[in-house]
Image: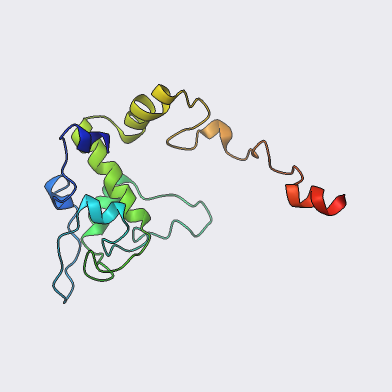
Amino acid sequence: MQLWERGSIRLDDPLTTYLPWARLKSIEEDSLPVTARAVLSHSAGLPRESDFPYWTGPDFSFPTQAQLEAKIAEQAPLWPASRWFQYSNLGFALLGNIVSAESGEAYGDYVAGHVLEPLGLKDTHPFMPMALYNKRSRSAGAPSLVTELVRS
């Protein structure tokens, strides 16, 4: 939204205005273009995920940028844009790419420098730092309020 406030992007432009490679396979029905506004409202008709099996083991690796760009042309929308709600991680990955393309900064650097650091969020990260892998949150394992109420 910072880029929109600065006039760097327009919410109703097709995503391909900013990401020419982000062309999905067409569907039979007429559709409005997929826009940032539709992605932000989860009404772009995009599939939930990129077409990679990264939710299945054993290593759970996410697609690289090159793989995302190559595979998106093989994916079709679920239905025409701006028709129904469907949560889409793929859509937010595309928005992150727009942030990078229009700001000239890597997504993580942009988020850290323009959102997290100005707000003083020292324990919040745009990506999971390797040092935190296999660590439990501070509250993990702590009794819940419900457990405490049941005991008393």
Q: Quadrant of the N terminus?
A: top left
Q: Nearer the viewer, residue 19 or 88?
A: 88
* Residue 41 falls left or right of residue 137: left
x, y percent for residue 3: 22, 35
Count of numbered badges drawn on the protein? 0
Residue at 32% x, 35% y: name it. Answer: 107
Q: Residue furthest bottom?
A: 28
Q: Nearer the viewer, residue 18 or 61?
A: 18
* Residue 123 falls left or right of residue 66: right
x, y percent for residue 48: 37, 61
Residue at 79% x, 51% y: name it. Answer: 147
Above or below, 88 relative to 3: below
Quadrant position of residue 108: top left
Quadrant position of residue 140: top right
Residue at 25% x, 38% y: name it. Answer: 99
Residue at 32% x, 48% y: name it. Answer: 93
x, y percent for residue 122: 50, 25
Above or below, 2 relative to 63: above
* Residue 76 falls left or right of residue 126: left
Q: Residue furthest right?
A: 152
x, y percent for residue 74: 23, 64
For the rendered model, the colour scheme is rainbow
